[in-house]
Amino acid sequence: MPHRSTRRLFLNQAVLSAGAAIAAPALIGHAAFAASRWASDPFRLGVAAGAPTPDGFVLWTRLAPVPLSTDLQAPGGLSGPSIPEIAADEAMRHVVRRGTATADAAYAYSVHEEVRGLSPGRSYWYRFMAGDASSPMGRAITAPAPGASVDHLSFAFFSCSHYEHGYFSGYRHAAEETPDFAVFLGDYIYEYVEQKRPVVRHHSDGVECITLGQYRNRYAQYHTDPDLQRLHATTPSLVTWDDHEVQNDYADRWSQTFDDPAVFLARRAAAYQAFYEHMPVRPVFSKPHGAAMRLYDRYDFGDLLRINLIDGRQYRSREACYRQPKMGGHVETATSCPELLDPSRSMIGMEQEAWLFDGLARSPSRWNVIANDVMMARLKQRTPSGEMGSWTDDWNGYPASRARVLQHIADSKPANPVVITGDIHSFWANDLKADFDNPASPTLATELVGTSVSSPGPDYETFKTYLPDNPHIKFFESRKRGYVGVDLKPGLLTARYRALSDVTDPNATVETLAAFAIVDGNAGAVPA
Ligand SMILES: [Fe+2]
């Protein structure tokens, strides 16, 4: 956990001694590697940790001495092992594990080292070595033991970091708050190049990503950002994706540009592979197979928190009334598009729905988070003719799927269900109602929506006009960029909506725009 909770929960010499007693495996090939000299630093993309379990985590880096080169055979002898060194202390004096991880040539010399056999519920520090190069140091955590009593956790969640539209000051400020972990809810990169609006910096190649090399370079450019590197080095991550990791508003094999599904799946395969190559995700579990990649997963933190990290893109039904000339998400009504209400349609696919329902029904945790890409709360949008419309790209486009999720929550009664959400480039606090048409109906769960790290928000005045038709929405603000910081205790969740002073200023400051609390046993956010 972060420095403070490590002290509170885990600072005891027995843990350190037990850790130090773990035998260090032989450094196979280490001598030979020590002789390998790099012409330039191979760790220019930084390091990251993720996927914490009670006995380990995944460590990530990618050997990229020429980060934006499409020539992966860059000089320096890239193939072969990179050696992660894991320590029980920040000064890295108590090394508990040395390994030999493979920088996989087929995956852009990325390293995904799945570490096991560590002590639960504490921080570790790590670095990689390859030849004469040593990476920056990073911090990882193991999750608390199953069922362990946990009195406090903190995390921050992020979405929508468009490199061209601003600096990643939100990442820097969140890192300074030393949360236990970070949750990335999607649009970690943007595949397109801004053509219409002014930008503060440029995607280096100036093209929309289609090929594996293009997606790779896009991720590599993002990973050269110092604020992003700092967050990853200090804060372990849980990651899911949204659309821009592939293409705006895609759904499974259906692109917003009406491509042949087979052609689009080839693009999706390239995009998923590049995502895998640049994220601290589990190597066996998440390694892509063609256009398929398992990302949705569950993370438990003792008796306090279960996070169901879901995949809202890969398995979703085609967007309702998918037809030219409309591209991607658009507003439809029940009369213009009866397909919208088709109960066979799903946002996350029936298999993932069943997986989610099982994870909620069997949860041992006091708090149950669904970490999700797009907004779940109903948002009625009045059309020019006065009809009530629904946006087809978020859960409003999949109302039967949303109703099944909420009905399952009503039936199985998981403790304190909270949905955390990105995508919409604005802050919201929403009551998820048993019946959105009846404000007096029970609030079953709470949705906290974080604004974008840098992507431009939707028009504030337009969206304000929707609020009277949506009384379950307790807060809306689209004019700020930032992130959400969450503090979690058994009896109380507190969410701070952190807003940057100016996303075009690399030295932007941050302040809390609003704070909300959810009290144990009482769904619905209240001002804190
Ligand atoms: Fe976005």
Image: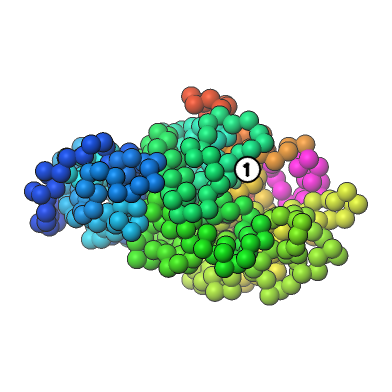
Query: Residue at point 57% right, 62% down?
Result: 264
Q: Quadrant of residue 53?
A: bottom left
6 up-or-down from 345: above or below: above
Q: Nearer the viewer, residue 502 or 83?
A: 83
Q: Is residue 140 magenta?
A: no
Is residue 10 toward the left or the right of residue 317 in the image? left
The residue range painted magenta reads 462-476
Is residue 63 toward the left or the right of residue 158 in the image? left
Question: Which colouring convention does the figure follow?
Answer: rainbow
Q: Nearer the viewer, residue 82 or 79?
A: 79
Is residue 326 toward the left or the right of residue 239 in the image? right
Query: Residue at point 67% right, 36% down?
Result: 196
Q: Is residue 285 visible?
A: yes
User: Any atom of ligand 1 within 8 Å of the CB at mark 1?
Assistant: yes
The outermost residue toward the right is 385
Q: Residue 407: x, y in percent? A: 66, 69
Q: Residue 245: x, y in percent? A: 52, 52
Q: Label 1 sits on what residue type? A: His
Query: Residue at point 53% right, 53% down?
Result: 210
Query: The C terminus appears in which quarter of the rendering?
Result: top right
Q: Is residue 464 magenta?
A: yes
Q: Report helix, strand or loop for mark 1.
A: loop
Q: Number of callouts in the render?
A: 1
Q: Residue 282: x, y in percent? A: 36, 60
Which residue lies under the disc numbered 1? 425
218 up-or-down from 103: above or below: above
Q: Quadrant of residue 453?
A: top right
